[in-house]
Image (cartoon, helix red, strand yellow):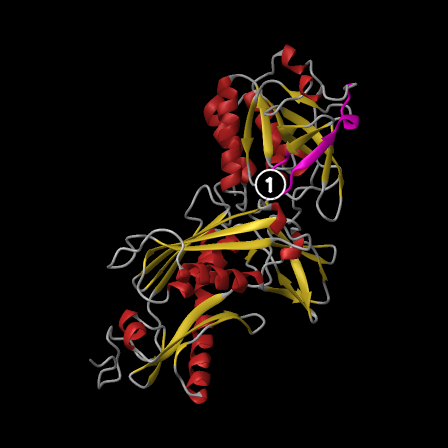
Amino acid sequence: MSLIGEDGKREDGRALDELRPIKIEVGVLHNADGSAYVEWGKNKVLAAVYGPKEMYNKYLQDPTGAVVQVNYNMAAFSVDDRVRPGPSRRSIEISKIIGEALERVIMREDFPRASIDVFIEVLEASAGTRCAGLTAASVAVADAGIPMRDLVASCAAGKADGHIILDLGKGEDNLGQADLPVGYVPGTGEITLLQMDGHMTREEFDSALKLAIGACEEIHDIQKRALKHRYAIHKGGEGQ
Amino acid sequence: MLKEEEAPAAEQRILVIPGEELGDNSYKPGTGTYLKGDRIFATLLGVKNVRSGYINVLPLSGRYMPRPGDSVIGIIKDVGPSSWIVNVNSPYPALMHVNDVPWKVEFGKTSQYLRAGDTILAKIGQVDETMRIQVTLKEPGLRRLDRGHITRITPSKVPRVIGKSGSMVSLIKEYTGCKVFVGQNGIIWMDGDSEGIAYASKCIDMIDRDAQMMGLTDRVRQFLIDKYGSEPRRREPEELDEEEWE
């Protein structure tokens, strides 16, 4: 089976360096302090933020700043086969890396001994949920009014059929040669998440990373627009 | 009382997001901002505000961070032999020692005065750098609240509920005939007839939802006029006997 057609288009008709359509909605949950919903191709991801609040598990409290606790979870119905509910090896790993990627931008030192809880719920999964999850979580943290240095945007690049491609789809993820999720802070140029699954040469890695960072800039714009849209300032309300 | 933001009506309210550049070092970084190199960036989602050389970001959401001297409404969470734990709607619980209440409380008899679930009008005493908070009832006007209703808003919007030198809250008081106290922590206490309370909390919901909009006071006034007619209702004399608390 070939993932890249002779016309240079992919399975779903995208160019090699093209993102899937991304939609971000802010403040979708009433009872959370901050929330965001992301549709990224066929992925559907909800993120909710609670806190900063008193940290239970008191022995885990950090007197120098807030602890960021992330819980990534895939709904049982999020993929074709049923996902066994509860934490798995994979979801524990993703929770940890997303937490560490967010921690770098949150001004933790403002909230000693507190905790910031982030819940990422994957409703529908089709490759790239950790990137969609981090992108959503970062918007939700901003929506919660938690001080942060910048937003984190996240996107994957990789290799399939010998080509370097952006934002792997399900088939490319399963059958391709490599997957490289990146979390990127556009303001500072920091990389707060970087994983690689599969094999690439150094040159391929460099161009994949460059591609992913470029896409993160684009995603950052979408995040920014979503936040501004949610709190659009209506000038000259009825009274004026 | 907090000042209403003093932006002239003509000045645009600019919405900023975390990481957005706000200006260079001809300004000083105020609240909700940080300095990187010689430029100032936002740390919060909010409205940019420039005042006396400082750039600030007024947040649209977020938890209440206690400051000494703030008047707040708290709810007793736990009772100890010589102190109470008070929930002041912040990420940290506050401690109220028996020395900070106006009664002479014997050791172990704390629950005769305040029990879990009681609501109090209190003042933030000390806050240390690890965010251990003390609250006090030992000032005139501070007391237990035995009646009335409670509603909550985003703490950063408290200045809008109060309005310029109290204009918004006195508008609501005038029309609904309710007593209203706005705690700096975003908990609002109201007392009056049930109709008045219903309309007052409608107004407060409106302010919470549309805080960043212009002309909010006029919209609240219009709402109240629709409900009550153009004449402000006069308050019953017996409702005035307790001292007014600002």
As displayed, is residue A169 above or below residue B83?
below
Quick one: A155 or A114, which is closer to the camera?
Answer: A114
Residue A151 visible to an observer of this rendering: no
Q: Residue at x 53, y 16 (%)?
A: B193
As displayed, is residue A141 above or below residue A213?
above
Judge left or right: residue B129 versus residue A36: right
Q: Residue at x 68, y 36 (%)?
A: B94
User: Residue B67 colored magenta?
Assistant: no
Q: Residue at x 24, y 59 (%)?
A: A80
Identify the subunit bearing mark 1.
Answer: B
In this view, which residue lies farthest toward the left?
A: A1
Q: Which residues are magenta?
A: B87-103
Could you say which quadrant of the image residue A181 lies in? bottom left
Judge left or right: residue B140 versus residue A132: right
Location of the N terminus of chain B by quadrant is top right
**Residue bearing mark 1:** B155
Number of labels in the image equals 1
**Residue A61 at x, y percent in the picture:** 63, 50
